[in-house]
Amino acid sequence: MEMLNIALPKGRLGEKVYSMFEKAGFPCPSIKENNRKLIFENKECGVRYFWVKPSDVAIYVQRGAADIGVAGKDILLEYQPDVYELFDLKIGICKMAVAAKKGFRDDTMKTLRVATKFANIAKSHYAAQGRDIDIIHLNGSIEIAPILNLSDVIVDIVETGTTLKENNLEVIEDVVPISARLIANKANFKFKSEPIEKIVKCLSQQTEAKND
């Protein structure tokens, strides 16, 4: 039996995703063992799972090391990998937003300084408004940038908004809703469409049941 290679994002989201696959009839009990292994397979079900950094899932899928995987919509918008986006899993729900210090007023006569990890999302958001911006690319603790006057605003993922509040920042604009998406390698999808479509069907039944 040919194995279906599935890239899962490490962390809480990946655990939620795996339990959806398990319910869909693609279990792999060894994944729950307490060890440092990264690859797990269940030959009877024809699945091989592996844990990768969330931002790397799309690379594994695009290059065919994984047939399918789960990536956040933020990653798909930022890096625009050449993959099929099959399905919205309706988990890992949050949003991309613009935030600034409380009371911030945008002076449109000046270039807006934007600190973000998501340069492409920020660029396309502001390009649609015709706003002139200066992107400051940061990898972590984006919230500090406006406090230390490195930037005017930040563009970042917001879940609860707690970190923003604790740093005296607030959302001033929503950019795009984010959730986890099932993606597939374009070439491999042709050869393995049957098991992939079976997974999509079983997962969509779960999300419909949740929403009922």
Image (cartoon, rainbow, N blue to C red):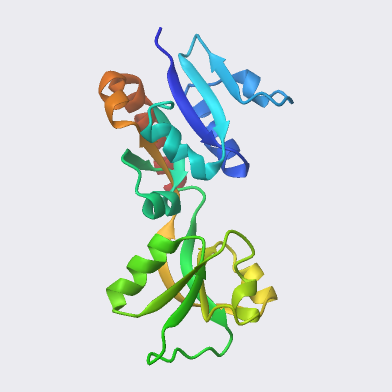
Examine the image and state in which quarter residue 28 appears.
top right
Q: Residue furthest left?
A: 190
Q: Where does residue 18 sit, x and y in percent of width and height?
A: 55, 32
Q: Where does residue 181 sit, x and y in percent of width and height?
A: 41, 43
The reply, left or right, for residue 67 in relation to residue 16 is left
Examine the image and state in which quarter residue 88 appears.
top left
Q: Residue at x 50, y 45 (%)?
A: 55
Q: Residue at x 48, y 18 (%)?
A: 47
**How many labels were placed on the picture?**
0
The reply, left or right, for residue 124 in relation to residue 3 is left
Position of residue 103 relative to residue 23, above or below, is below
Q: Along the line of sight, which residue is nearer the eye, 167 or 78?
A: 78
Q: Where does residue 116 sit, x and y in percent of width and height?
A: 51, 66
Q: Along the line of sight, which residue is nearer the eye, 132 or 69?
A: 132
Answer yes or no: is residue 46 visible.
yes
Q: Residue at x 46, y 64 (%)?
A: 96
Q: If the image is split into quadrants, where does the N terminus sit?
A: top left
Position of residue 188 relative to residue 56, above or below, is above
Q: Along the line of sight, which residue is nearer the eye, 113 or 33?
A: 113
Q: Where does residue 114 sit, x and y in percent of width and height?
A: 48, 74
The reply, left or right, for residue 207 in relation to residue 28 is left
Answer yes or no: is residue 206 visible.
no
Position of residue 130 relative to residue 89, above or below, is below
